[in-house]
Image (spheres, rainbow, N blue to C red):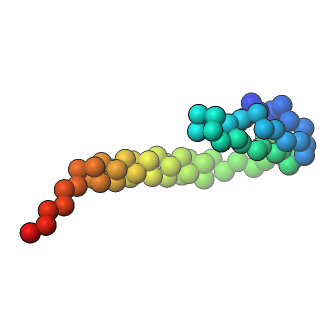
Amino acid sequence: MAYELAKLDKNEVSTGLTRSNGQTLVFLMLCDRETQLAAEVDEQAVQTELQNQQIDGFANQLLARLKAETCIVRY
């Protein structure tokens, strides 16, 4: 996605990306471009978001495993 955005100018669109093995077309638009120097990056917030994503992934894996191992017995 970053490569596709790098090719776009302000207010330009792209339909060159797909998802789901080419079954879903991605409509991508670059509304504005901001240099990294102008953007304030909160490193702590980025680190926290990455940690949250990792924890969410672990939780989803655990939930999927628990669902797969569930055995319902009726008496």
Q: Quadrant of residue 30?
A: top right
Q: Residue 49 versus residue 64: which sits nearer the camera?
A: 64
Q: Residue 40 versus residue 67: which sits nearer the camera?
A: 67
With 44 as the anchor, is 7 left or right in this view?
A: right
Q: Where in the figure is residue 40, as x and y percent of width and height?
A: 75, 49
Quadrant of the drawing holding the N terminus: top right
With 51 as the anchor, is 46 left or right in this view?
A: right
Q: Where in the figure is residue 38, as x and y percent of width and height?
A: 83, 45
Residue farthest along the bottom direction in this orientation: 75
Q: Quadrant of residue 63?
A: bottom left
Vertical arrangement, residue 25 with respect to residue 64, above or below: above
**Residue 18 appears in the picture as rendered:** yes
Residue for point 86% across, 36% down = 8
Residue for point 74% across, 30% down = 3
Residue for point 59% across, 34% down = 21
Q: Where in the figure is residue 15, as x and y percent of width and height?
A: 78, 38
Vertical arrangement, residue 3 with respect to residue 59, above or below: above
